[in-house]
Image: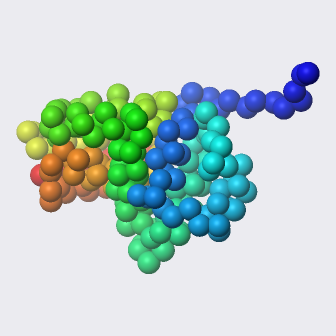
Amino acid sequence: MISSEVLVVPPVSQRVPRRTFEALLRPEVAELTPALEASLQSLGLDPRHLADHYDLPTLRAVTELIRQQECAALSFDDGLREVGRRFVKGFKQTPIGWIFNTMAPFFGPARTLQQLPRYLTSVREEFPLTVVTEGETRFRLICLDAEAMGAFMAGCIEGVLDTCGVSGALVHLRQMDQGFELEISW
């Protein structure tokens, strides 16, 4: 029997693998309330039966739903940062995230940040990120993608540095027309 369903695969630059949504929908990130589940369903995402890939607008929409539910008392950017920090906690519970959680403290924060563009391909198949080393404990991350969420990424970096044993890191976000820049120091 031939199925009449058409499988739409987003372009590689927009593809976000299932594991990203598995991490976002973990209890460490958000409570899967009936309201959140209904909102996810309206986006075409069934949290109990995830597709292999979704597109970047779906990731943005799901992240926003979680921000609204879990961080409504915070400003928009602070809420996205908090969701980013929680995302790292959820990601560390996935099989690939478990490897990251084990290896990042061993590699240390500098090496982990330098390898970030490679690591991010496990979260989004293409992530246009440049890492600039400005000193032993100073880095700049430049993302020239208008679709990327700078505040969310700032929170992720805070979570990554926490995983590496760094406390009190400063992650300054500068939004640009076509992306963002993060200045990181500890």
Q: Residue furthest left?
A: 136
For image coordinates 47% across by 53% down, the residue present is 26
Pinpoint residue 108: horizontal percent, then vertical percent: 15, 37
Q: Specify whether residue 174 is in view.
A: no
Is residue 145 rendered to the left or right of residue 62? left
For image coordinates 53% across by 69% down, the residue present is 69
Q: Residue furthest top?
A: 1
Q: Quadrant of residue 10?
A: top right
Whether 78 is drawn above or below 102: the answer is below
For image coordinates 68% across by 30% down, the residue present is 9
Pinpoint residue 99: horizontal percent, then vertical percent: 31, 33
Nearer to us in this view, 104 or 140: 104
Pinpoint residue 132: horizontal percent, then vertical percent: 22, 35
Nearer to us in this view, 19 or 49: 49
Q: Specify whether residue 28 is in view.
A: yes
Nearer to us in this view, 92 or 140: 92
The total of numbered circles placed on residues is 0
Is residue 183 rendered to the left or right of residue 72? left
For image coordinates 91% across by 21% down, the residue present is 1
Pinpoint residue 97: horizontal percent, then vertical percent: 36, 39
Protein image colouring: rainbow
Is residue 37 rendered to the left or right of residue 129? right
